């Protein structure tokens, strides 16, 4: 089966991932992402995560020793 024979897949938007999908991709629980949101992680009120903003938030916490 060639690349053109594959069935189309839903495209993911890394700037607006639903928490469940983000958790699956990152290999963490959805509860962990909710805990991070409570700690200030940039998760939209509608429950979507921007992967780049989240990575920057995690990096800042690591730099600050959080």
Image: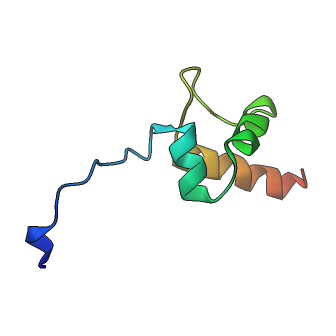
Quick one: which residue is furthest to the bottom in this view? 1
Give the residue at x 9% y 69%: 5
Position of the N terminus by quadrant: bottom left
Residue 50 location (% of width, % of height)? 52, 41
Give the residue at x 75% y 44%: 32
Q: Is residue 26 above or below residue 35?
A: below
Horizontal side of residue 22 vs 29, given as left or right: left
Quick one: which residue is furthest to the top in this view? 45
Q: Based on the displayed image, in which of its 4 quarters is residue 40 positioned?
A: top right
Give the residue at x 55% y 47%: 22
Residue 30 location (% of width, % of height)? 67, 42
Q: How is the image coloured?
A: rainbow
Horizontal side of residue 49 vs 41, given as left or right: left
Residue 4 location (% of width, % of height)? 9, 69
Residue 26 location (% of width, % of height)? 60, 57
Give the residue at x 36% y 47%: 12
How many marks overall? 0
Q: Is residue 57 above or below residue 16?
A: below
Q: Based on the displayed image, in which of its 4 quarters is residue 7 positioned?
A: bottom left
């Amino acid at each position: 089966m060639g690349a053109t024979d594959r069935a189309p897949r839903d495209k993911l938007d890394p700037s607006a991932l639903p928490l469940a999908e983000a958790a699956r991709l990152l290999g963490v629980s959805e509860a962990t992402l909710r805990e991070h949101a409570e700690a200030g992680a940039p998760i939209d009120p509608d429950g979507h995560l921007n992967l780049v903003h989240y990575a920057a938030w995690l990096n800042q916490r690591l730099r600050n020793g959080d």
